Each structure stands twice: as structure tokens, then as C-alpha cells.
């Protein structure tokens, strides 16, 4: 015999995330990289930064590191976000 | 899907015959087998069978905690996701909880949502922690909880269902499924359920919750983001220092092999060992002070276990397992015979702090 049950999921309740507008070019852009702060991110983002500058014409790269790699980024770190053209949030181990 | 039909949420209240309507979407399933198939396909379950979260069962759970469906349990801050009593109750029913269990599920989840618990980090981390839940107070007797035999492993139905309810709620309300928001490299079996009651009746000490500030007569829950238990044995001494040296050795091993950073450790002291502490007149504070003094390693010790690469220039620097003596949670539990004990290490140092809440406490006003 059939019966009715209730949905146990959040049903997409809560904040909805939207992608930022896509850039058509990185030429002359300021790109920020926020690292989670783990040791392995350093050489990886060094390489990313080099490629952004040498291969994609990025004017400057802003490197930021979270103080706690298990917690959300501090709001203060994002205070200058309006001055960046793009942001890469990086998680490493 | 065969045997299943779904409908958008009934928001008019007509279906529930209740002044506080349930708002979750509804699905009609042909039978129990269809429910299990739906739960597996949708990722609602840990793989074990689930109980049907019918409106009647969910209303009963909510009534058991004197909560309305829209009562706000708390907000997970990373995703800014509100957790309602209705959704938590649905997951509790699926986990097998009865209405009498639900107040403890509510209290545990409220504790997990306290900022210092850092729920997102604790459940998403590669470190693989599970939520250790310790129940104190009269609820233990009401629910027939057994802090004795097999205390750390499926000791009684209430412990299993309460711990599992938290896990299913993490799955369904915060997407903490393996490979989704739960990025654990290994995890451990406690993720299914890691709940136990303290054996207060056979303990020489005030309860864990009362030591941590809850009224002694209240039912209470302590949650801790915890690694797997590390079992130890020392039944060849009655000397408290020597018994604790065994616990300390296990803590120091965890500091060497896993994480050196200080945080909450829990130790489980079984009746046979508790007898020796009681005979010697040792309090919880005495045990905490001893462990605080001795649970230390030098960074240099990393060399002995293959971690020489990260010793650096600070080899002589000493690290303590605890930031303060009361970081140590002492749990009286376990079967009556055997000189066993257990050390339960923190997920990762001080990132997540253990939280203790009395059932019915207001987390906003502290009452």
C-alpha cells in the first residue's frame, strides 16, 4: 500500500550562488588568488601566477592567504574585491 | 522512478490538519522497498535502510521536543543555510529516532552549529572527523541508554539512532556526503554513529556535562569533532599516575603520528580503572592536570616516525596536547570488566572546540 513521505533535503533553501560575469580577456587585468594557506599551495600558485602574467597578459596578481584553512575567508580579505577583475579561490593540501 | 511520485510542497496546511503545517515536499512511494530505493538514488541515506518520514511521524517527533516545524535550530554560517526543526525531524525519523530521542538530536545539532564548533570545516575536512556525542543526565535512563558494555560500539538503540540522525542531517541539509561536501580522505566508522551515554551511575565524579557548566539535574549533550578511538590497556597497576601514563603515551603517539596541535582530547575511563582513581581520591581536575603536565612531545620526535622533513629548526620546541587542562574531556563509560580505556583525539588541534549544551537551553540568550 502506498504512502506519503516528506523530503529530507534542504530543497535548495538558503543563499543561492551566482557566477560572476565572465571576462573576455585577462589582458591588463588584476587577478587575486586566495589560498587556503596549506604548504602545498605555494609552489602551485607561484606557477599559476607566472602563467597568468607571461601567457595571459595579466597586469598584476594579488596573493592572499586565509588565516584558517578550514574556515571561510575573512571578510576583510575580500574588502578590496571591487578592485580586482577576477578571483581564484584555491584549495590545496 | 518506479513506485514513486513526487509533489511540490503543500503549503496551505490542509494536508496536515495542524495549525503548524509541514512545508517539505512530499513523495508518494509504493511500499517500503520503494522508499529504500528512493533514499539510495537520491543520496538520502548512509546505505542502511531508513524509516519512512511520514507527516505523522515527523509531527510526533516535533511534539516530543515541543517544537513547531518552523522553529529555527540554527544557521550553518558558511552556506548561510537555516536548519529548521521540521527538516531535522524528518532526518531523525529516517534514522530510526523516536519522539523521545528528538530533543537530544535538536540539542546536539544546536551545539554543532555554534561558531566555535566550525561545523563546515569539521565535516568537510580531509581529516575525516566524525561527531562524537556524549549524553548526560536523566535522558539516559529515560531512553535506556547503556554507557556500559560496548560503550563505543553500537551500545544501545538510542545511541545508534541519535548519532545516525546527525549524520543523515549532515547529508541532507548540508550536503556532507562522501565526495560532496564531505572530503574526508579516510573517515572512520564513527561516522555512522558516534554517540554514547556517560555511565553516571557508576562514576565517582560529577558528570561530564556538569563539569562543563550544565546544571547537574539537566539532560545535556556534548559534541566534539573527533578522530577514531584509540584503545589502550593497563590492568597491571592500581596507581593513577601509571594508568594515566598509558593514556598519555597514546595521546603522545597521536601527536607524533597524526597531529601535534593542541585541542580537545577525550579519554574514556572504564569502571575497572575508575575504581583505582576513586580509591586514590582523584578528581576529574586531578586527571586533567596530570595529563596537561605530561602529554607533551618535542617537535624533534617527528624524526622517529618519518616526519623529519617538517621538524625544521624548532626541534627542541615542546608541544602540549591541550591548550588548558579543561580541554580534556573525561568520559566514564565501558563494561565492568577489563582494564581498557580509549583516547579520542580531536579532528585537528583547536580548530573545532567541543560544545556542551543542556537540553532546552537557548543558544542565543544562554539560558
Image (cartoon, rainbow, N blue to C red):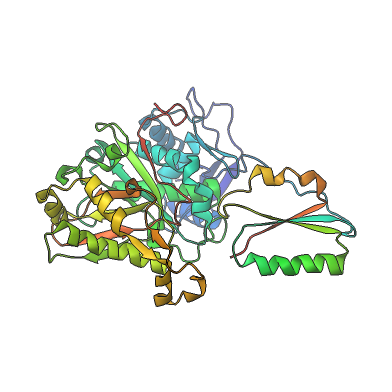
Of the pair B17 and B264, the residue shown nearer to us: B264
Q: Quadrant of the C terminus of chain B?
A: top left
| Count of number-bearing discs | 0
Q: Quadrant of residue B23?
A: top right
Q: Nearer the viewer, residue B83 or B113?
A: B113
Task: Tell me if I can see residue B146 in this picture.
Answer: no
Q: Is residue B96 left or right of residue B307?
A: left
Q: Residue at x 85, y 61 (%)?
A: A58
Q: Nearer the viewer, residue A74 or B311?
A: B311
The quadrant of the image that shows the N terminus of chain B is: bottom right
Q: Is residue B339 visible?
A: yes
Name of the residue lying farthest toward the top:
B19
Report whether B13 appears left or right of A12.
left
- Residue at horizontal 76 percent and vertical 45 percent from the top: A80
Percent position of residue A90, x then y? 67, 59
Which percent across, then down, holds residue B337?
13, 59
- From the viewer's perspective, tell me whether residue B15 is left or right of residue B141: right
Q: Position of residue A85 (x, y in %)?
A: 83, 51
Farthest left residue? B279
Residue B238: percent from the left, percent from the top?
A: 11, 59
Q: Residue at x 21, y 46 (%)?
A: B199
Amino acid at each position: 500500500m502506498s504512502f506519503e513521505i516528506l523530503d529530507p533535503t534542504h530543497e535548495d533553501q538558503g543563499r543561492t550562488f551566482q557566477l560572476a560575469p565572465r571576462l573576455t580577456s585577462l589582458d591588463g587585468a588584476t587577478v587575486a588568488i586566495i589560498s587556503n594557506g596549506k604548504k602545498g599551495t605555494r609552489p602551485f600558485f607561484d606557477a599559476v601566477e607566472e602563467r597568468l602574467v607571461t601567457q595571459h597578459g595579466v597586469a598584476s596578481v594579488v596573493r592572499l592567504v586565509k588565516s584558517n584553512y578550514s574556515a571561510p575567508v575573512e571578510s576583510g580579505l575580500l574588502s578590496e574585491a571591487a578592485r580586482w577583475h577576477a578571483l581564484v579561490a584555491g584549495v590545496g593540501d | 522512478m518506479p513506485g514513486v511520485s513526487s509533489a511540490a510542497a503543500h503549503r496551505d496546511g490542509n494536508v496536515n490538519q495542524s495549525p503548524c503545517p509541514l512545508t517539505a515536499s512530499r513523495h508518494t512511494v509504493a511500499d517500503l522497498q520503494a522508499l529504500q530505493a528512493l533514499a539510495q538514488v537520491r543520496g538520502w541515506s548512509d546505505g542502511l535502510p531508513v524509516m519512512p518520514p511520514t507527516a505523522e511521524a515527523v509531527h510526533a517527533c516535533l511534539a516530543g521536543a515541543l517544537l513547531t516545524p518552523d522553529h529555527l535550530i540554527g544557521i550553518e554560517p558558511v552556506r548561510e543555510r537555516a536548519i529548521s526543526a521540521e527538516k531535522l525531524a524528518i532526518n531523525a525519523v529516517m534514522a530510526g529516532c523516536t519522539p523521545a530521542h528528538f530533543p537530544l538530536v535538536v540539542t546536539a545539532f544546536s551545539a554543532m552549529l555554534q561558531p566555535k564548533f566550525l561545523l563546515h570545516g569539521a565535516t568537510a575536512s580531509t581529516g575525516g572527523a566524525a561527531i562524537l556525542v556524549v549524553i548526560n543526565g536523566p535522558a539516559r535512563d529515560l531512553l535506556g541508554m547503556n554507557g556500559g558494555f560496548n560503550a563505543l560500539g553500537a551500545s544501545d538503540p538510542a545511541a545508534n539512532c541519535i548519532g545516525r540522525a546527525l549524520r543523515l542531517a549532515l547529508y541532507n541539509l548540508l550536503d556532507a556526503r562522501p565526495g560532496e561536501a564531505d572530503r574526508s580522505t579516510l573517515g572512520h566508522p564513527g561516522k555512522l554513529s558516534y554517540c554514547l551515554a556517560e555511565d553516571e551511575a557508576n562514576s565517582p565524579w560529577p558528570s561530564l556535562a556538569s563539569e562543563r557548566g550544565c546544571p547537574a539535574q539537566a539532560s545535556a549533550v556534548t559534541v566534539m569533532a573527533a578522530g577514531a578511538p584509540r584503545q589502550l590497556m593497563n590492568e597491571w597497576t592500581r596507581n593513577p599516575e601509571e594508568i594515566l601514563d598509558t593514556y598519555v603515551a597514546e595521546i603522545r603517539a597521536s601527536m607524533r603520528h597524526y597531529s601535534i596541535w593542541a585541542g580537545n582530547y577525550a579519554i574514556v575511563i572504564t569502571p575497572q580503572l575508575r575504581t583505582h582513581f576513586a580509591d586514590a581520591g582523584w578528581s576529574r581536575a586531578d586527571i586533567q592536570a596530570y595529563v596537561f603536565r605530561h602529554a607533551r612531545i618535542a617537535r624533534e620526535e617527528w624524526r622517529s616516525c618519518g616526519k623529519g622533513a617538517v621538524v625544521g629548526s624548532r626541534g627542541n620546541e615542546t608541544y602540549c596536547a591541550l591548550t588548558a587542562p579543561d580541554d580534556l574531556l573525561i568520559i566514564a563509560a565501558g563494561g565492568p570488566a577489563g582494564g581498557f580505556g580509549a583516547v579520542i583525539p580531536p579532528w585537528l588541534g583547536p580548530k573545532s572546540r567541543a560544545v556542551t549544551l543542556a537540553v532546552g537551553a537557548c543558544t542565543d540568550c544562554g539560558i
